[in-house]
Amino acid sequence: MALVAAGDVIQLRSRRDRKAFHFRLEPGRRLETHKGIFEHDNVIGCSYGQEITSHLGESFFILRPSTDDLLRTIRRKSQIIFPKDVGFILLKLAIVPGKLVVEAGTGSGALTLAMAQAVGPQGHIVSYDVREDMQNLARRNLELENLTDRVTLKQRDIVEGFDETNVQSLFLDVPNPWDYLGVARAALGGGGHFGALVPTANQVIELLDGLNQEAFVYPEVLEILMRYYKTVPARMRPDDRMVGHTGYLVFARPVEFAHPKRAILDETDPDYESTNTDIDNER
């Protein structure tokens, strides 16, 4: 069985109420919680999956935290992008090992952390934010997972533009993304992947209009709802609470039109179609 080593980031998860603690193991240190004290030295050398107890007798299992676990428990000063949205963002922006990805709106670094894991050691994330305190917090969250070498944090307003060009994927998590579509368009390579998150419908409308003006095509708008189920076999049913609306996700692709006058479409244009871009597979 895999043994827990010094330097590992682990999760101690309560057997009784699923309360969890995440931390990096360092010899000589201790974790003090309301459920008791855990000496790091007593955890190092144990097996993953093993049950241990605090000095108060509270039982916990030693587990490796998933990305979902980490995002839900990172230190934050602002609302993070929820794991249910993060997963879809990674798919839609084609964030895979080796990719260069730019984001604006670092925040507490939840999406930054997930993207840094996805691009691997050969990829890189460049993240912009105007607030120094936010980027300092994001840096600490990235340090927990030893991901700082995959991320460059830049503190400045993106109205000045991005330093990067020919970027493959770019995501905006800012209150007014339509104001930055021009600089986003300049940073993205042709046919690249653009995404943004906004909380309200009127913001979506303004963003869609801006995408059209800046020659982004195939826009998609969606929201992701997630419902958990009770896991007691005798009363299997939906949970009493669910994470409903967290934000609208908007995606599009930048292109170069052969005839610039054809770039901007409206409902009177014969080429205008719904923003639903489901692809029919011909068989």
Image (cartoon, helix red, strand yellow):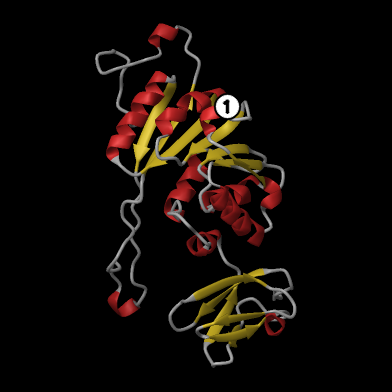
Left-right relation of 125 to 185: right
- Which percent across, then down, holds residue 56? 54, 92
Query: Which residue is depicted at the point 71% across and 79% down?
Result: 44
Q: Is residue 39 above or below residue 181?
A: below
Q: Would residue 17 be visible to someone looking at this image? A: yes
User: Which of the 4 image quadrants contains residue 16?
Assistant: bottom left
Left-right relation of 12 to 214: right
> Quick one: quadrant of the N terminus?
bottom right
Left-right relation of 236 to 116: left
Q: Is residue 261 above or below residue 242?
A: above
| Near-viewer residue (44 or 227) | 44
- Which percent across, then down, holds residue 9? 65, 68
- Which percent across, then down, holds residue 208? 35, 28
**Which residue is disc 1 drawn over?**
187
User: Which of the 4 image quadrants contains residue 177?
Assistant: top left
Question: What element does badge 1 sit on?
Answer: helix
